[in-house]
Each structure stands twice: as C-alpha cells, then as structure tokens.
Image (cartoon, helix red, strand yellow):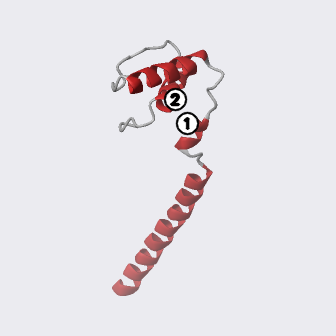
Amino acid sequence: MRVRMNLRQCVWILAMVLGSGVVGAARVSATPLPQASQDQDYSKNKNYQVGVNDGKDDKAHNKDHSRKRKFKKDDDQKAYEAGYQIGHPSDPQR
C-alpha cells in the first residue's frame, strides 16, 4: 500500500516537471533574441557618424575608446557605440 502511494506521488511529480519543461520551452522559443535589438540600423543617426569618426580617430592614434560621450537618449548612446565599433573594429571589449 505504501509503495503504491509513493509510486503515485513520483508519477505525479514527474508529470508536473515534464509539463513545466514543455511550457518553459515554449516560452523561451517565443522570446525574441537579445541580439535582434543590436541589429538595428543606426546609419541615419548623427551620433552613429560621430561614433564612427571617433572610432577611426582612436584607431589611427592607437587609443582605446578615449572619448566617453554621454547622451540623454539611450537610443543615441546605442547609435554612438554601434558607430564606434565600426570605426574601431579591433576593440576587444565588445
């Protein structure tokens, strides 16, 4: 009798674990990848061009991200950083 009760509990726990795994996998597959936001086209943003120019200048003078610019808008900061990475492609931090 006791063994049968333990077996039922084990089967129930196993079913719950498998069910939550399927739900978790479905949720993960529906979540967009974090890199998708990095693929945004900032080429028309003026801060992107500033970043490209700063990156090229730092590369030419063998500097590592010497200018630390801050922008009010997060999108402008991302555009600048994306441009900088294009202008200074061998930056090992990114």
- Label 1 environment density (alpha carbons within 10 Å; few <14, some 14–19, many ≥20): few
Q: Is residue 4 above or below residue 82?
A: below
Secondary structure at badge 2 equals helix
Residue at the image point whose x is 45% and y is 35% from the top: 89
Residue wearing tag 2: 82
User: Relative to the observer, which residue lies in front, 91 or 35?
Assistant: 91
Q: Is residue 29 left or right of residue 51?
A: right
Which is nearer the N-term, disc 2 or disc 1? 1
Considering the numbered disc 1 on the image, is that residue within a helix, a strand or a loop?
Answer: helix
Callout 2 touching callout 1 (CB < 8 Å): yes
Q: Which residue is mark 1?
A: 38
Find residue 82 and report its horizontal and vertical position in percent. Answer: 52, 29
Q: Residue at x 48, y 26 (%)?
A: 84
Q: What residue sits 41% from the left and 82% below the top?
A: 7
Using a 10 Å C-alpha cutoff, classify the residue at mark 2 as few (fewer than 14 neighbours), some (14 to 19) or many (20 or more). many
Quarter of the image with the N terminus is bottom left
Number of marks in picture: 2
Camera-side residue of 50 and 36: 50
Quadrant of the drawing holding the C terminus: top left
Residue kind at label 2, given as amino acid type: Ala
Which of the labelled discs sits on residue 90, or is there none?
Answer: none
Q: Is residue 3 left or right of residue 49?
A: left
Given residues 27 and 94, the one toward you in this image is: 94
Q: What residue lies at 56% left-to-right and 22% top-to-bottom?
A: 48
Residue at the outermost top position: 72
Q: What kind of residue is marked 1? A: Gln
